[in-house]
Image: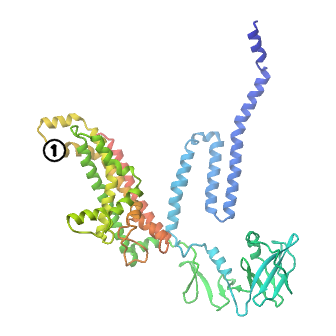
């Protein structure tokens, strides 16, 4: 046996060592994923508990179901086929189904800037509202350190000084008795940062003054002897201690109301069923503008798709001629609008349509002697929107048509030329019929996408000019998507009504998407 073989045998591990290492690898392969799964489960349960404590029980349920499903899929051998599908299904649930469900739930509520709180939070807000009765006093407040404890110092407007007994913040369970003193120096009083950290504890502090009145915190450095404005009766009604009116919750309007029907803010969210949809279709101040916006959205989408397709097809047909020089340069120039970010492109074009300083009116004034008011006239504003939209969309249509035209066999055009046909005959009898079927699903999809083109309206006109006969802000150039945005984030912030419009918009776009998918499937058939 040579030295090399002997060295190999000496370095080789013993059989028992190899077996021991194999067992450790097997245990690691078995318990490693389980340890990760258990850790993920514990973290998920902690998140669920925190969401539940904070009142977000719906999100807690979603997280709990997600964590349990993930542990089942990744820790069970029989569910191994789902391990590759689970991330995609989870993403679809979180980013598609959950937003849709949340939007539908908002559309059946009165959620708005006046009805933001839940019923319990609105009740709590009213119960914590205080008022200053006749003879009530305000006191300047200071927190004085006393070893590891503190003393509360109050000074009235008349200069009387009161000092409490020593207490530990958060452990003063009863009203602290205040004694009148000659003076209590403010040199060592707690700074603002300490007061801010202890504000939750100080708000619960009750200071009993010598005359029997009780003072509570009203601001960071003041206490007063105000009283709760409302007290709750056993039947759930609230009594106003100032004027003795009775408030009862109205779960239809979402407000506490007096016997005369006067609403008291803040409101609370309630379920209104299909009331938001009925408002869009039956309310006098809302149905007519909504139907006008819906009709304009249909017209805008149809005009944008048809005109951009016509322009793209015409340019693609010209650029398909082999005899045309600089074809690639022309393609690049025509495609530039799509290469520029939409926001920048629209803002630049918007400046071109300015009445006094825009290049468009400068040309029109030089040629025809007119300066149209593009942003004030409803018809001109809508025309401008369509022009800009077609300018943004036609490069995409041009590139699609170029690809489809290139796929047409050249022999067809050669046979047509031998038969004596001209360019127009080639276009109407060869080019257009052969690209119509594959381009149709794209046109339907583009029609659906223009429904959601709220960005163009927001950057170009902001929806203006506005309708004057509506309670909610709606403009004559608004599409359904931009109208929903304005209702949700401007004016009264009517999120419920905006969600109802979004649901209707989703249904329309979903139907168009199904039609596009069906057409796409049919284009692959050979009749």
Residue 47 vs residue 23, the one in the foreground: 47
Q: Which residue is mark 1?
A: 425
Q: How is the image coloured?
A: rainbow
Determine the residue located farthest toward the bottom in the rendered image: 134
Between 433 and 519, the residue placed more toward the observer is 433
Percent position (x, y) of residue 327?
Answer: 27, 41
Q: Residue furthest left?
A: 420
Residue at figure coordinates x 38%, y 63% from the top left: 460
- Residue farthest right in this picture: 147
Residue 527 seen in the current view:
no
- 280 vs 56: above or below: below
Residue in view at x 63 percent, y 63 percent:
56
Point 73% across, 78% down: residue = 221
Q: Is residue 483 visible?
A: yes
* Mark 1 secondary-structure assignment: helix
Q: Is residue 181 above or below residue 441?
A: below
Q: Is residue 41 left or right of residue 520?
A: right
Q: Quadrant of the N terminus?
A: top right
Quadrant where the C terminus sits is: top left
Q: How many marks?
A: 1
| Residue at (72% x, 86% y) in the render | 226
Relative to 89, does residue 303 appear above or below in the rendering? below
Q: Is residue 178 left or right of residue 439?
A: right
Could you classify mark 1 by the number of other residues whose Cα lies within 10 Å: few (under 14), some (14-19), or many (20 or more)? few
Q: Is residue 400 left or right of residue 159?
A: left
Q: In the rendering, at what x and y percent does residue 522 appear?
A: 33, 45
Which quadrant of the view contains residue 236? bottom right
Q: Nearer the viewer, residue 446 or 515?
A: 446
**Is residue 215 left or right of 241 when viewed as pictured?**
right
Residue 404 x %, y %: 29, 42
Residue 206: x percent and y percent?
79, 80
Viewer-side residue, 357 vs 101 = 357
């Amino acid at each position: 046996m040579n030295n090399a073989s002997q060295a190999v045998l000496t370095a080789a591990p013993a059989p028992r060592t190899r077996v021991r290492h194999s067992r450790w690898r097997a245990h690691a392969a078995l318990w490693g994923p389980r340890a990760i799964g258990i850790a993920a489960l514990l973290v998920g349960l902690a998140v669920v508990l925190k969401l539940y404590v904070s009142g977000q029980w719906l999100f807690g349920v979603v997280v709990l179901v997600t964590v349990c499903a993930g542990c089942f899929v990744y820790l069970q051998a029989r569910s191994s086929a789902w391990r590759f599908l689970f991330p995609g299904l989870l993403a679809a649930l979180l980013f598609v189904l959950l937003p849709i469900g949340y939007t539908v739930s908002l559309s059946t509520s009165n959620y708005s800037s006046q009805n933001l709180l839940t019923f319990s939070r609105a009740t709590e807000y009213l119960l914590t509202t205080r008022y200053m009765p006749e003879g009530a006093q305000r006191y300047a407040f200071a927190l004085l350190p006393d070893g590891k404890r503190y003393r509360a110092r109050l000074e009235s407007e008349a200069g009387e000084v009161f000092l409490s007994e020593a207490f530990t913040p958060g452990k003063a369970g009863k009203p602290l008795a205040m004694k009148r003193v000659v003076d209590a120096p403010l040199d060592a009083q707690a700074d603002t940062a300490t007061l801010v950290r202890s504000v939750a504890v100080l708000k619960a502090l009750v200071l009993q003054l010598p005359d029997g009145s009780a003072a509570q915190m009203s601001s960071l450095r003041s206490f007063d002897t105000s009283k709760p404005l409302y007290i709750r009766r056993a039947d759930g009604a609230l009594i106003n201690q100032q004027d003795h009116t009775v408030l009862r919750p109205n779960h239809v309007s979402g407000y506490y109301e007096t016997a005369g029907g006067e609403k008291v803010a803040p409101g609370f969210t309630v379920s209104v069923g299909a009331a938001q949809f009925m408002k869009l279709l039956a309310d006098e101040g809302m149905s007519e503008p909504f139907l006008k916006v819906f009709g304009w959205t249909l017209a805008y989408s149809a005009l944008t798709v048809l005109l951009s397709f016509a322009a793209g097809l015409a340019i693609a047909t010209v650029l398909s001629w082999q005899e045309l020089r600089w074809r690639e340069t022309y393609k690049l120039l025509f495609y530039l609008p799509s290469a520029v970010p939409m926001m920048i492109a629209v803002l630049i074009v918007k400046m071109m349509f300015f009445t006094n300083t825009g290049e468009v009116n400068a040309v029109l004034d030089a040629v025809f002697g007119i300066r149209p008011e593009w942003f004030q006239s409803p018809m001109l504003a809508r025309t401008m929107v369509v022009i800009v939209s077609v300018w943004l969309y036609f490069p995409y249509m041009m590139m699609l048509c170029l690809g489809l035209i290139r796929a047409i066999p050249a022999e067809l055009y050669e046979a047509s030329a031998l038969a004596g046909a001209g360019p127009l005959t080639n276009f109407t009898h060869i080019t257009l019929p052969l690209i119509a079927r594959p381009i149709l699903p794209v046109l339907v999809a583009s029609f659906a996408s223009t429904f959601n083109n709220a960005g163009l309206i927001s950057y170009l006109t902001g929806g203006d000019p506005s309708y004057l006969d509506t309670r909610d802000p709606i403009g004559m150039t608004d599409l359904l998507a931009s109208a929903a945005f304005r209702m949700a984030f401007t004016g009264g912030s009517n999120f419920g009504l905006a969600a109802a419009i979004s649901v209707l918009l989703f249904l329309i776009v979903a139907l168009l998407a199904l039609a596009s998918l069906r057409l796409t499937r049919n284009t692959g058939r050979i009749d």
